[in-house]
Amino acid sequence: MNIIVSVENGGLKRNRELSGMSVEQLAEKAGLAPEMIREYEDGSRDLNRVDLLTLLKLANTLHCPLTALLTDPATLAELEKYENDDDDAPIPDPAADSSAQIAAIRKLTQELTE
């Protein structure tokens, strides 16, 4: 018994057609296989579960936001939270942390060798 599951990936085809590209052109420009694009468009592969790099390649090639390609409500909700993050907490600077650690190690080394 074969069970066929299809998912709604309409944003990809809609944006591809709006851009005037064929499946082959999109695949070539995005560095993806044409068959993969076809499978996303026909719903046999779920575009909502693809890796971020592939999504970014498609969105950048089509000049559209990620939200134009995704259809999963939970994913869209998380993406909206990410894009609207107005947390004013400062983002730590890894380079500053490294510099402070290096300075502390140098000081400790100096103290130990004196």
Image (cartoon, rainbow, N blue to C red):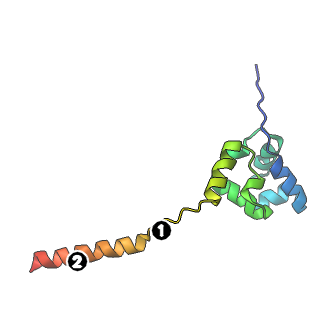
On screen, residue 25 versus residue 45, left or right, reads right
Residue furthest left in the image: 114
Q: Quadrant of residue 3?
A: top right
Identify whether 4 is placed above or below 1.
below
The residue where tag 2 is placed is 106
Q: Position of residue 70 (x, y in %)?
A: 74, 49
Closest to the observer, 38 or 104:
104
C-beta proximity under 8 Å, tags 2 and 1: no
Considering only vertical position in the picture, is 1 above or below 33? Answer: above
Say few, some or many: other residues with alpha carbon within 10 Å of mark 1 (under 14 / 14 to 19 / 20 or more).
Answer: few
Whether residue 29 is visible, yes or no, is no
Give the residue at x 78% y 54%: 68
In the rendered view of the protein, which quadrant contains the C terminus?
Answer: bottom left
Q: Nearest the camera: 113 or 23?
A: 113
Q: In the rendering, which numbered label is found on residue 75?
A: none
Residue 59 point in image, percent of width and height: 74, 59
Could you tell me which secondary element the residue under label 1 belongs to?
Answer: loop
Q: Is residue 95 left or right of residue 32?
A: left
Up-down: is 4 above or below 81?
A: above
Q: Amino acid at mark 1?
A: Pro
Q: Nearer the viewer, residue 28 or 52?
A: 52
Q: Position of residue 6 (x, y in %)?
A: 79, 34
Q: Residues within 10 Å of mark 2 (few under 14, many from 20)?
A: few
Q: Which residue is mark 1?
A: 90
x 29%, y 74%: residue: 102
Q: Which mark is first along the chain, 1 or 2?
A: 1
> Quick check: 86 left or right of 43?
left
